[in-house]
Image (tube, rainbow, N blue to C red):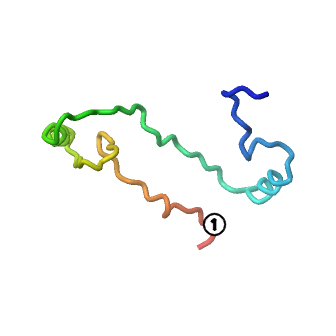
């Protein structure tokens, strides 16, 4: 029985599996892709006792915060539109 901390192998670690071999054949010669870690270094939960406190905090960090805001980055980060990132081999 596997321990709770043991992770199952990823698709790419399955060994001599037919699907893995097809993947290797299809991607042979493709440029390497390295995904940088986009997770925050630290997250905090901040509680406000009233809307005025929230507004004052928003002013301090120079960001727009509303009652429905779930998270912010400090300093503010530009959104990444990954849909425009593609590898093109030919013009």
Kind of element beneath mark 1: loop
On the image, numbered disc 1 is attached to which residue? 89
Q: Residue sitting at 80 percent across and 51 percent down?
A: 20
Q: Is residue 4 above or below residue 84?
A: above
The N terminus sits in image quarter: top right
Taking the image as shown, residue 83 lies to the left or right of residue 17, namely left
- Against 14, residue 6 (above or below) is above
Q: Quadrant of the C terminus?
A: bottom right
Name the image quarter holding residue 28. bottom right
Looking at the image, residue 18 sits to the left or right of residue 61; the answer is right
The residue shown at (63%, 66%) is 89
Residue 60 image point, x, y percent: 17, 38
Q: Position of residue 41 (x, y in %)?
A: 42, 33
Q: In the displayed image of the protein, which residue is found farthest to the front?
A: 49
The picture places residue 81, in percent across and down from the top left corner, at 44, 59
Q: Residue furthest bottom?
A: 91
């Amino acid at each position: 029985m596997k321990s709770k901390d043991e992770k199952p192998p990823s698709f790419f670690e399955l060994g001599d599996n037919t699907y893995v071999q097809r993947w290797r054949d299809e991607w042979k010669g493709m440029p390497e892709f390295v995904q940088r870690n986009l997770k925050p270094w630290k997250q905090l939960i901040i509680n406000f006792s009233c809307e005025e406190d929230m507004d004052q905090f928003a002013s301090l960090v120079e960001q727009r915060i509303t009652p429905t805001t779930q998270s912010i980055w400090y300093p503010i980060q530009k959104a990444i539109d990954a849909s425009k990132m593609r590898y093109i081999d030919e013009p």
